[in-house]
């Protein structure tokens, strides 16, 4: 029996990244002569990686985008975002203590994000968190990304875990759907970036603070899980 694996989403779950994502997105908006996006916009723009975020922001401001323009804007975003790291981004309250508790109980940890793998690693390195995780996979690590269930299942494989002994924690519809698609129990957090309440995606449980995340909760969700198929 492998040890339980606790898989975290990154943006809006592990780390409060929206202020820095927004600053770099608005840098790209400036370069294209477009109005800035607001924090409220971010709850809808974030979720499918930076390129989709730019595309959605341009649509919001009625700016048509060719693939070439979008590629150039994405490059400009990456340079700006990476140069500013870690910026204002920091772990959510109680996260580090929760990671300590889970590790002390013999559980393993992983990250499954739609952020590009390179940016995810850079950010987690800056915050001295990389060594905590058995696997860190991004939206470009495989040929699928959340909400596809295989993004989670392949993250479990990379972490050396087993599909029936893992939980997923996330803030957005992509995380909860991916967990449901993978038949992995889903924990929703309400403090991230979602334009709809995380409850409305029907996670197995919602925790409003990382103080509630411990081995007993993870074990109870795994014990109650509904097997695939
Ligand atoms: O950066 C994004 O768009 C999404 O990232 P997440 O999957 O870590 O929330
Ligand atoms: Mg997220």
Image: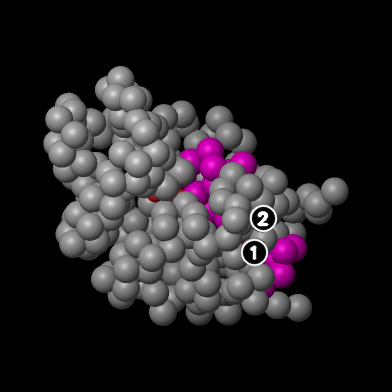
Q: Residue at x 74, y 63 (%)?
A: 164
Q: Position of residue 198 (x, y in %)?
A: 50, 36
Could one spot residue 216 in this view of the protein?
A: no
Task: Give 66 or 12, whichever is nearer the viewer.
Answer: 66
**Horizontal side, residue 46 vs residue 141: left or right:** left
Label 2 Cα crowd, 10 Å radius (few <14 / some 14-19 / many 20+): some
Q: Residue at x 31, y 39 (%)?
A: 69
Give the Cα separation between the discs numbered 1 and 2: 6 Å
Which residue in the protein does label 2 denote? 150
Q: Quadrant of residue 85?
A: bottom left
Q: Which residues are magenta?
A: 161-179
Q: Give above or below for 189 relative to 219.
A: above
Q: Position of residue 100 (x, y in %)?
A: 43, 74
Q: Secondary structure at mark 2?
A: helix
Quarter holding the N terminus? bottom right
Q: Give above or below for 77 relative to 30.
A: below
Task: Give 61 or 75, whichever is nearer the viewer.
Answer: 75
Q: Position of residue 9 (x, y in %)?
A: 47, 55
Q: Which mark is residue 154?
A: 1
**Horizontal side, residue 32 vs residue 229: left or right:** left
**Horizontal side, residue 154 vs residue 183: left or right:** left
**Horizontal side, residue 57 vs residue 117: left or right:** left
């Amino acid at each position: 029996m492998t040890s339980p694996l606790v898989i975290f989403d990154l943006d809006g779950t592990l780390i409060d990244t929206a202020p820095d994502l927004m600053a770099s997105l608005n840098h790209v908006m400036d370069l294209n002569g477009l109005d800035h996006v607001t924090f409220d916009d971010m709850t809808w723009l974030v979720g499918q990686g930076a390129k989709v975020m730019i595309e959605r922001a341009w649509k919001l401001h009625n700016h048509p985008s060719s693939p070439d323009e979008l590629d150039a804007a994405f490059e400009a975003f990456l340079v700006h975002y990476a140069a500013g790291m870690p910026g204002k981004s920091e772990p959510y309250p109680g996260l580090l203590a929760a990671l300590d508790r889970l590790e002390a109980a013999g559980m393993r940890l992983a990250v499954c994000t739609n952020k590009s793998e390179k940016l995810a690693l850079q950010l987690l390195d800056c915050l001295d968190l990389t060594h905590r995780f058995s696997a860190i996979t991004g939206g470009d690590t495989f040929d699928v990304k959340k909400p596809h269930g295989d993004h989670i299942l392949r993250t479990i494989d990379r972490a050396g875990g087993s599909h029936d002994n893992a939980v997923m924690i996330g803030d957005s519809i992509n995380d909860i759907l991916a967990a449901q698609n993978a038949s992995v129990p889903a924990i929703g957090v309400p403090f991230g970036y979602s334009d709809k309440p995380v409850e409305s995606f029907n996670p197995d449980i919602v925790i409003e603070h990382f103080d509630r995340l411990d081995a007993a909760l993870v074990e109870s969700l795994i014990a109650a899980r509904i097997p695939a198929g």
